């Protein structure tokens, strides 16, 4: 597959244009490249798509967002400017810096690699690499395990809290919004998301940022902590 370009996102795009272009670029990437997550594909999945989900949410709320992605060494990933109706979304400033972080299963990279190499894999704690990549005799081993039905969301909750705490220890320009891109190990309904996020609010301090949102770009769920 030819490399993808993210240059268009370095310009300010209105909400619908940003979302539409993100979807077009995503559709141009084959499944193997999506699982490899290298170069611009990694930035697309870990930065552009969560930002697109957030921008879509703001657009639907009438905040009239325009957004620009930054691909560099600065301490944030994007800038978003908002129209006068932003107040109805609880956003008082007319522009914000946006930082994105990802909360995913700690073994997700092995899961994706196994799908590309072997065609199947169990996503749980019992997945590991056997052999040596340097010698070229490695393989990914996974075994089915039983766990409580609520375990995947509990695991995701811990990951979200860890990402927020990690980001809160760093310095960002003000005002700044943190987006936590969260992908559970299985499909969760909105009620389960709300219950999980309610528990997160009781266990983490989000005061280092003006606002913190948890987003899922697959479903376009956007929740404010």
Image: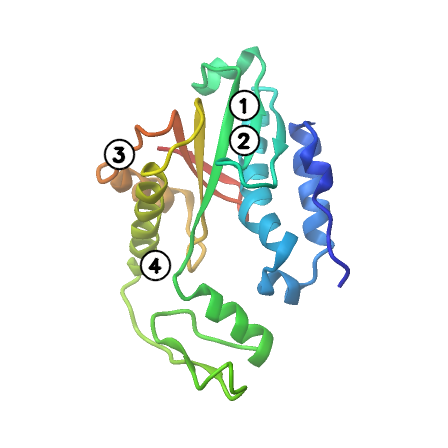
What is the quadrant of the C terminus in the image? top left
**CB-based contact (under 8 Å), mark 2 and mark 1:** yes
Task: Tell which circle, 4 or 1, labels the residue nearer the N-terminal end.
Answer: 1
Is 12 on the left or on the right of 125, as rendered?
right
Q: Position of residue 102 (x, y in %)?
A: 45, 49
Mark positioned earlier in the residue sequence (2 or 4): 2
Give the mark toward the camera: 2 or 3: 3
Q: Secondary structure at mark 4?
A: helix
Q: Secondary structure at mark 2?
A: helix
Q: Are marks 4 and 1 in contact (CB under 8 Å)?
A: no
Sequence-first tag of 4 and 3: 4
Q: Residues within 10 Å of mark 3 (few under 14, many from 20)?
A: some
Measuring from the top left, give residue 125's x and y in whole percent.
Answer: 34, 70
Residue at 53 percent of width and 46 percent of height: 219
In the picture, which quadrant includes the N terminus?
bottom right
Q: Nearer the viewer, residue 172 or 119?
A: 172
Look at mark 4 in the image and give the residue it sits on.
152
Cα gap from disc 2 to disc 1, whole angstroms? 6 Å
The colour scheme used here is rainbow
* Residue located at (56% from left, 28% from top): 79
Crowding at dot 4, Cα within 10 Å, few <14 / some 14-19 / many 20+, comes out as some
Q: Which mark is residue 57?
A: 2
Q: Secondary structure at mark 3?
A: loop
Marks 2 and 4 close (CB-CB < 8 Å): no
Q: Which residue is labeled 1 in the image?
A: 61
Question: Above or below — where is 16 with respect to 131?
Answer: above
Q: Which mark is residue 205?
A: 3
């Amino acid at each position: 597959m030819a490399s993808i370009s993210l240059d268009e996102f370095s310009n300010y795009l209105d909400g619908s244009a940003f979302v539409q272009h993100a979807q077009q670029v995503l559709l141009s990437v084959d499944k193997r490249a999506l699982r490899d997550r290298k170069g611009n594909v990694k930035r697309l999945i870990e930065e552009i798509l969560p930002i697109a989900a957030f921008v879509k949410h703001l657009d639907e709320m009438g905040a009239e967002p325009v957004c620009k992605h930054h691909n560099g060494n600065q301490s944030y990933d994007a800038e978003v400017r908002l129209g006068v109706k932003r107040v109805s979304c609880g956003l008082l400033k007319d522009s914000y810096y946006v930082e994105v972080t990802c909360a995913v299963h700690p073994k997700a990279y092995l899961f994706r690699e196994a799908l590309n190499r072997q065609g199947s894999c169990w996503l749980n704690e019992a997945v590991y690499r056997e052999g040596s990549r340097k010698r070229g005799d490695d393989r990914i081993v996974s075994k089915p395990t039983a766990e409580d039905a609520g375990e995947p969301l509990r695991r995701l909750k811990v990951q979200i809290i860890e990402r927020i705490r990690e980001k809160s220890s760093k310095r960002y320009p003000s005002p700044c919004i943190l987006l936590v891109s969260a992908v559970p190990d299985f499909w969760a309904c909105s009620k389960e998301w709300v219950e999980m996020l309610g528990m997160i609010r009781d266990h983490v301090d989000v005061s280092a940022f003006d606002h913190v949102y948890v987003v899922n770009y697959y479903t376009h769920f956007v929740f404010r902590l």
